[in-house]
Image (cartoon, coloured by chain):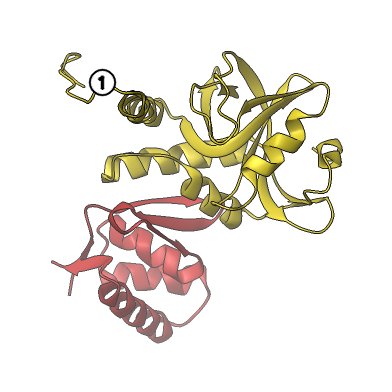
Chain colours: A yellow, B red
Amino acid sequence: MGRRSGELRAAPNEQCLDAFLRSLTSFFLNRAGGFMLHSAGLVKDGKAYIFLGKSGAGKSTLSKLAASRPGVELISDEINLLRREKGRWRVHGSPFWGEMRADGRPGSWPLGGILLMSKFPEHRIKPCTVPEALRLLLRCSVNFEAGPGTSERALSAAAALLAGAEFRRLYFSKKDNSFLELV
Amino acid sequence: MAYKIRKDLAYRRIAGEVYIVDAAKSEMRELNGPAALIWEGLAAGKKGEAIASAIAEEFETDAATARADLAAFTEELLAARLIEKL
């Protein structure tokens, strides 16, 4: 990367291109103090909200529920890109989608908040602690390099994000999309 | 005995706690209180006596207790392979 040139040899198919673009995007975002987050993202009232959850936490379910609500727009049900610009965090659309298989949503929006997802019989929203937020943030951060430099940059970016964004825990049920009123 | 932190670990103090990321194992550890102080002392290359003094001062304990805490936690860090003997 330092030489600004190189050669890529890969099978000419969509999966290879997708994997390459994910690796490249995470490489540059890590160096730019940003994040590629395994998450669901949506726009409400002009602000972007990121929903973090481990596999099975309900990102696809939440995305489908949110998509049916007028005035709410999905950014991605799988990968969302965060970057700090002029001291403020913004969320960028990406071509990376999960189950919903949309075509990508170009654009960027100011970050409204980050929600840690938990399935629950009813919708609730509560504050969360720094350790639980950091743990899930790093777990959901997509990096394809395992070197200490990558980890140091991710920790540094996480500290900045924890200081500059509101993290809360969202308990949500798949019965309806009224959890959006709490966001 | 002097120790050094493993080169491939990343760590940072965030909101009062020290977080250590071991990317090779996909593990994260959290340290607070005297443990965080010991870690940062080791990271700064301080000698055991200096770290024990810092613990005694910060946590208002006597020097013998601070030295014992340091020795016990250093053993834990060695066992967890987070630090190495120099």
Residue B54 image point, x, y percent: 41, 67
Please state which of residues B1 and B61 is positioned toward the viewer in this rendering.
B1
Residue B78 image point, x, y percent: 26, 74
Taking A65 as reference, is B37 left or right?
Answer: left
Please state which of residues A106 and B80 is positioned toward the viewer in this rendering.
A106
Residue behind mark 1: A12
Q: Is residue A84 above or below residue B73?
A: above
Identify the chain of the residue marked 1, using the numbered disc in the image: A
Q: Which residue is drawn at 59% across and 17% down?
A: A105
Quarter placement of the C terminus of chain A? top right
Q: Residue at x 86, y 40 (%)?
A: A178
Q: Which residue is drawn at 17% across and 23% down?
A: A9
Q: Residue at x 58, y 53 (%)?
A: A56
Q: Quadrant of residue B76?
A: bottom left
Q: Is residue B80 above or below residue A77?
A: below
Please state which of residues B58 and A130 is positioned toward the viewer in this rendering.
A130
Q: Is residue B86 above or below residue A49?
A: below
Please state which of residues A62 and A145 is positioned toward the viewer in this rendering.
A62
Badge 1 amino acid:
Pro
User: Tag 1: Cα neighbours inside 10 Å, few (<14), some, or many (≥20)?
Assistant: few
Q: What element carries label 1?
A: loop
Residue B18 image point, x, y percent: 45, 57
Taking A102 as reference, is B76 left or right?
Answer: left
Quarter placement of the N terminus of chain A? top left
Q: Quadrant of residue A161?
A: top right
Residue B67 image point, x, y percent: 35, 81
